[in-house]
Image (cartoon, rainbow, N blue to C red):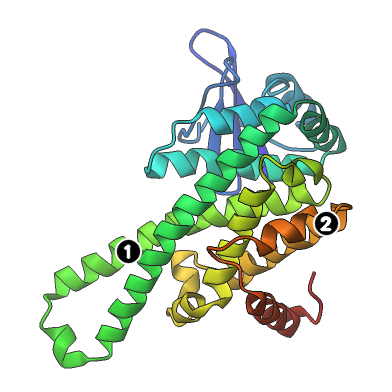
Amino acid sequence: MTLVVLTWKNDGGYDMAMVKCGDDVVMCGDDVAFVRRMPLCAASTRYSLVKGERIVRSVLTAWLRAFQMSELYVRKEFTDSPEQYEFRNNIIKILEYLWEIPSHCNAWRQIAQEDTSFYLVFLNFVINEIMFFLDKSLKRILGLAEMEAEMSNNAEWERILFQERALNIHNEEDMIGDSMSYVLANVGMLAFTSEQIKVPFLLPQIVDIVATMLNYILLHLVGLQGKSSRRLKHHKRHAYQPKILLNKNVSIYVHLARGDRENIFPAAISKDSRSYNEQLFTDAATVVLHEDNCVI
């Protein structure tokens, strides 16, 4: 994904900057903790990340620190609103891009090692977000699948007014799209960070929560409910991408297992009474192997 920096002078003569990631625009002014969406400024000057690296580092120096980015993510109020996951989606996109920059990656690893208490809060918050929005999304996905099944019964479907049918479907698709893209972004963030940062995930305070989340996702992707939701038509239209989500989820399992020298992780996985089922892992491996001929 291309990161574009736009700079201009405001009415007071102060330097302003805008970061554009793909189609999403994140605004950072002189207060680096202030982030909001803004329309593009026609008079702005565009810079690629390479050409504008000096500007990126000067304008966003403090903000790009792993601690401040993570803190900004966590402190946003937990509410069920499009603005919430739009806000955090933008942060995640930038974090993922910056993860490829060694200095930023090293800073993130240092925070995880030296400020464990904060990093546990961060992980717990991300996991809560995933569980909340995934549960909500899956219920909507199953409901939409039932709605699509009703469409095959033309006589019954025709009884519903056309406008009502269209409104119901579009509303459900929009809600599923917003929440599932958010879930995928958060799981993806845990996937790419867990490849190099493993210890915090395996601490006694949170390892059970991590295992429960992973098992829960696995259950809904390859279990009975997952098989039902995979019957949904036009997955890409509402950002429901079960194969990508499964691959990212499996990668977290593998990353943490590789870093677990005391067999803490398998114990946490197996004692999860809510979602754990040994057969799920066999089924998941079959799906992933069928796609890529390798688990990861």
**Rendering quarter of residue 156:** bottom left
What's the amino acid at mark 2?
Asn
- Tag 2's secondary structure? loop
Q: Residue furthest top?
A: 12
Direction from residue 174 to residue 195 in the image, left or right: right
Residue in front for this viewpoint, 269 or 72: 269
Q: Which image quarter is the C terminus in?
A: bottom right
Residue in front for this viewpoint, 283 or 262: 262
Marking on residue 141: none
Residue picked out by circle 2: 263
Q: Is residue 230 above or below residue 259?
A: below
Q: Residue at x 77, y 79 (%)?
A: 292
Direction from residue 95 to residue 53 in the image, left or right: right
What's the amino acid at mark 1?
Glu
Q: Label 2: few (<14), some or many (≥20) within 10 Å?
A: few
Reading the chain from its start, which is encountered first: label 2 or label 1? 1
Residue 117: x and y in percent read 69, 28
Residue 234: x and y in percent read 45, 77
Residue 66 seen in render: no
Q: Residue at x 31, y 85 (%)?
A: 149
- Separation of marks 2 and 1 at Cα, in angstroms: 42 Å
Q: Residue at x 11, y 75 (%)?
A: 161
**Rendering quarter of residue 232:** bottom left
**Rendering quarter of residue 277:** bottom right
Marking on residue 172: 1
Residue 220: x and y in percent read 52, 70
Residue 264: x and y in percent read 78, 53
